[in-house]
Amino acid sequence: MVFKKRWALTLALALMASSFLPLSPALAEEASTEPIEFVDEDETAVEPEVNEDSLRYLLLVDSFETAERIPTRRLSTPAEVVVVTADEIDANHYQSVDEALSHVNGLVMGFINGSDRVLTLVDGRRSFMHPPMKAIERIEIVMGGGSALYGSDAVGGVINIITKRGDHDETHVDVNTGSWHRHRYEITNQGNDGRLGWFIDAGIGKSRPFKSSSGENHADDYDEKYASIRLDHRFDDRNSLTFDLQHYSNRYNKYRTDRSPNYFPSNFTPKYELDNQVALTYKFKETTSTPGFLRYFNNYSDIDHRLYGKGSSRLQGVDYQNGWEMGQHRLIVGVEWHQSSDEHERWNYAQKKINNTAYYIQDTISMGKWTLVPGTRLDHNGQFGHQWSPKVAANYSPDDQTKIFASWGRVYQAPNARQLYTDMTRWMTVGDSLIPYRYESWQGSSNLNPETGHTETIGVEHDFSDKVNASLSLFNAKITGYLDLNDYGATVDDIRLLDLNYVNSSADKQRGINFVYRQKMDDHWSYNLGYAYIHRDRPLGSEEYISHWRAPRNSYRASLRYQNGPWRASLHGIMGTGAGGTNYMEDDFALLDFNISCDVSDWATVYAKAINFTNQNRSYYGRGFNAPGRLFQVGVDCYF
């Protein structure tokens, strides 16, 4: 243990020093400071020919930064990566990240590849909240395990929301209204004076609840306010400083009716949520193939949840990454220090702090048609000690239109404060009985162990032409000691009693298939077809109560898009079988989303959309007030 601590400290000091100390003359000659170059079989540096228009119609992007934490090309990246671009966000007038993700094949109710262990980032940093849609440049979704680079939450995949830099002078005003007295007003302003760029977004949203046929209010109303500020100061072409500030507040549940006031008297009073996040990032070597950064961030959340009561949490940290290109190798190394601080009134624990320090190293090795990516991560958790998470991935491109990839990685996740410290019991009487029943109990345990396991993915992607693309991937994962809730409750006089304990259950096994076919038919029409199969084996007990209903076993997606002059329209179909009835009216469902927009002038666009037109009750994975039933919406977007 002493040796490991000394080794970790030595590595951390070496990594920090490397960004400020000069390289040795020999290494400095090898280290590349030029942008990425791609080499063909003759070893002549060339840039691949890319038909950007076809990529846009096929909803493809040629380069990513999330999969390997450095810029990589689509057909040389050993992973399945999906990108939702700003153009797609604008064309569909998405109102939230969750709405945009609902149209991504293989991602259902926040699950990727059937796993709920999904890490969400904003500009590469951990985040409690999503930025406004107008502030988003792109959303990169990496399917498959990413624990070696990103840590314990990235078992199923990574969602990285990349925000916009202010690069030109423009102001947007977007106003829309729709079903359930839903209104949203948003204004953005961006600009650039040469060295300083800014992007500012602010808005408010309101809604009344959705009523059932019996007159009860079932869906949450909301009254939200949000704002985001991004400031970028560029010192030169390679170095810049970025300041990010995000704020979100919401008062909701004002009108919800209580069906069981004697049993749950406090659940339906008005609730609130407050999120504030700030980050400062210094970026260096930005135009090279191995850019680096040094970042500090601080996320704070205070919430009174309808089901879980009052609590607050803070996550702050320092992240550092640097890299070098040496011949066929692109090496990156990084250090992260994160501290979480949580307290919760209902679950009866005061402020609990958990520290985690991590070190990672990865090498991207280019060998002609082959790309090999080995890497590993060392996490030191303040309560559970050291854990290694190695990963290896390989990509083979037999030609300029095809990639075949495979990856394997270890899984590690330590228990959080809720799972360790919860100690809550509430009592009630039923009927005429004078004997109190323990109707609700939530218990954590200090004896929990971290989850461990492994994930594997194999896949292929091929461009049949500049108008047709298809991809297929197969995934498998096994997590031992899955952290879960076991429900030991009984039923007394038709009242369901909750008796929940956090435990390390037996193995959680996930496997499945993702298939997507994309085609551009002509200059106006394109379509996507997708199928995902997810099979998950988990122990009974908490399975049906907690999460089985959230991911249908078979899901099908079809999207048809049209563009002609000022007109844009899209039709999205989402179908599933084996879903369970908690968030859908039936185990088998078919949903339909539609939108149309028209640029009526050089400065204004009008749009209309229908979400869940078939009214089969899909809820997005979010705060619980999105689209509880059929939603119609109209709006106007003005820009100056």
Image: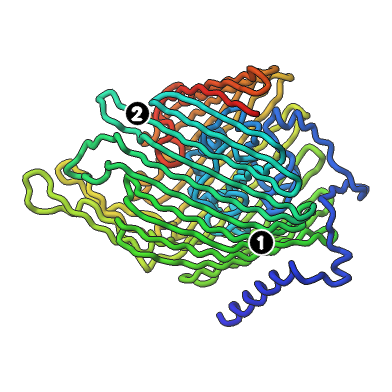
Q: Label 1 sits on what residue type?
A: Leu
Q: Label 2 sits on what residue type?
A: Phe
The residue located at (43%, 39%) in the rendering is 224
Residue 345, disc: none
Residue 400, percent from left and from top? 81, 39
Residue 210, disc: 2
- Reading the image, the residue beneath label 1 is 294
Quadrant of the drawing holding the C terminus: top right
Give the crowd class for mark 1: few <14, some 14-19, many >=20 residues within 10 Å: many
Q: In which quarter of the image is residue 166?
A: top right
Pointer 2 with pointer 1, Cβ within 8 A: no
609 or 45: which is nearer to us? 609
**Which SS class for mark 2?**
loop
Give the crowd class for mark 2: few <14, some 14-19, many >=20 residues within 10 Å: many
Q: Can residue 533 be seen?
A: no
**Does residue 203 appear left or right of residue 288 in this picture?**
left
**Does residue 342 appear left or right of residue 530 in this picture?**
left
Marks 2 and 1, how far apart in space? 46 Å
